[in-house]
Image: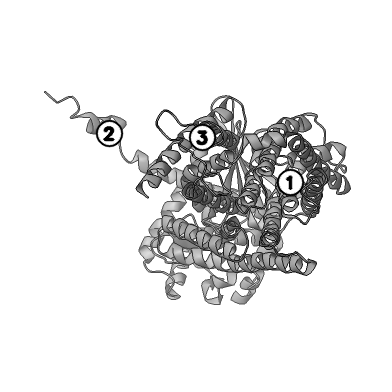
Amino acid sequence: MAEEMMVLMLQLGIILIVSKFIGYIFAKYLKQPKVLGELVAGMIIGPYLLGGIAIGSLAPLFPLPMNSTVPVSPALYGISTLGSIFLLFGSGLETDLPTFIRFSGKATVIGLSGVIISFFLGAGVTVLFRPEVNSIMEPEALFLGTVCTATSIGITARILGENKKIGTPEGVTIMAAAVLDDVISIVLLSVVVGISSVQLEGGTVAWSMIGFVAFKAIAFWVVCMVLGIILAPHFTKNMKKLGELPLISEVSFGIALLLAGFSEMAGLAMIIGAYITGLSLSQTDVANSLSKRIDSVSEFFVPVFFAVMGMMVNFGALKAVLGFALIFSAIAFIGKLVGCGAPALLVGFNLRGAFRIGSGMLPRGEVTLIVAGIGLASGAINHELFGVAVMTMLVASVTAPPLLLEAFKSGGSGYKRSLDFNGNADQITIELDFPSMRAAQFICDTVMEGFIQEGFFVSKLDSSKYASYQIRKDDIVILLNMIRGEDEEATVRFFCGREEESFVRLMMLESVADFKEFATTISSMGDTNMISAQLLMNMFLEK
Amino acid sequence: MKLKNILNKDLVKIDLKGNNKSEIINELLDLLVENGKLKDKELAFKDIMYREQQMSTGIQQGIAIPHSKTKSVDNLVACIGVKKEGVDFSSLDGVPSNIFILTLSPSDHIGPHVQFLAEISRIIKTEESRIKILNARSKNQVLSVFGI
């Protein structure tokens, strides 16, 4: 036991150090998401490459365990599962539930169509090219179909944010449809896990059985979501009375772990419980603070998950299916591009807009890996098909960003009608100039604190030139931009609906008053020479 | 925010007597004291006047919204006063103020009074509602402008 734990610590140490470094290199020099670096790190140090080699008298650091579908030790796999729970709990927390519930019709059509077309293309091509798979109802086809459905919202959001395209009609639609995609993929995963487990236990799957499994999965979702939405605000409200914000994060994560266990007991995947817990809490006013606290711990566990997923790639097995992997990657690519692009044409976008949306939905990430990982661990797919899934994810994630950038480069509106997509006629701009960026930042911090206290969610939008924040509560969306002038002066600019005008103006006024009070308090400290004398008087007295 | 949870008939005065800023504020604070809404009138007065020094709350079109964060209340409290002839409240447009909405909220956050003031401002933005308040003969008529 002691030796197993010693090995585990060594393994974790190596995983963290190597995956963090390679992740850094991917992000900094290759301009790729760092998760890809962590995945590649896992491949390099895993049991099928360096980790499987014994050095002198020392045994391999990552030996292949006997009689296991997973090529790492149960203890390490456990830690990586914890990583996936952190990841999905965090994703749920960062989802904007009100927007999610109030989905615009366009995004629903695009997201759903993308999922359906990708699923059937993925499952279909598996049946077509894999002789051992005879029907799309077999576990292999089901899992590979599901692998094709998820979209990595993180990669798309980063690219759109950096290029200030998040607010465009295409940007808004992509972001909304990608959230929907992930949720549908996870629900689909629940159903697929259910059906596969029946098949793997030797049972035959009748349509009535599929209906029952789907019903069970969806019922679990609905019951947990409804309970979550009702209970989460009461839970956080009561916990807040204790005055300990950290306590709320830790107890919430405890609930996520419990629900993860329950969802596994109900025959679904564990991450579903974690995701639902996060999603329920995302509507509460502490979501932002919870998210920040969880993120700092996630940074230690999530790389272990990605690295272990990389370790599962058996290069020997992949060689045999390389041709299939390429075809599958291409089909998955086409599935999303056409599956999301074509319906975009039907809901008001032109060809340029449809291409932008199609390419925005291409990146794949954590959900793809989770689906494949669960498939491998449950024995539903073998090492060869797991390798295919990882390769599909890598191909999509590497090719999508340049394609997306190119799609948005070719100027012009992607929308058929000249109608203003966001209904900007009712939007107003409120501006206030400040003598310096520091003063503007102070006021903005106070204003945002005020909004948070009023139950708004404040999130920083990825943007290098301007500091931009999105402030939202239910269907109210306020944008805050800080713009630096030529001579150090700064302008704070709000975009909001007419309904919110008084609120924003007064909030700004209160913050400026607060700032003035702060300035008065500081100046009451007296002459700066006196302060410096008080601070430095004894500094040069030592003998 | 539900205005009717904060305002009621007893918190309205349609014939304020004061002739300057501090008299008006004192009168409105007395109204809160009479209704048991204020723990420490002196402190509240000091806090409101301090806020007035930072920035006058006489806004425009005869409206003044004296407000402050203070330790003298536990919850958001407010009252409405009207003085047809108007008094100088150092307002932005120089016009004497005649509709006063005084708000006090607990001191530890920027908090709910902004939402309350925004809601009130939204209603009295129109000239029609301001005229209705000024011409009101009863407290209920004032409250009806706010939908209470």
User: Which residue is drawn at the image coordinates 59% and 59% (left, top)?
Assistant: A283
Percent coordinates x, y for residue A529 in the rendering? 28, 29
Q: In this view, does A133 lie above or below A42?
A: below
Task: Tell me the chain of label 1.
Answer: A
Q: Mark 1 points at which residue?
A: A148
Q: Is mark 3 on a helix, strand or loop?
A: helix
Percent coordinates x, y for residue A349 in the rendering? 85, 43
Give the CA separation, mark 3 to mark 1.
31 Å
A257 sits left or right of A409 in the view: left
Q: Alpha-carbon neighbours of circle 3 within 10 Å: few (<14), some, or many (≥20)?
A: some
Q: Name the residue under label 3.
A: A52
**Discs 2 and 1 share one subunit:** yes
Between B93 and A99, the one lying in front of the other is A99
Give the CA separation, mark 2 to mark 3.
64 Å
Between A340 and A496, the one lying in front of the other is A340
Q: Name the residue under label 2.
A: A531
Q: Is residue A347 above or below residue A363?
A: below
Q: In this view, does A236 lie above or below A509?
A: below
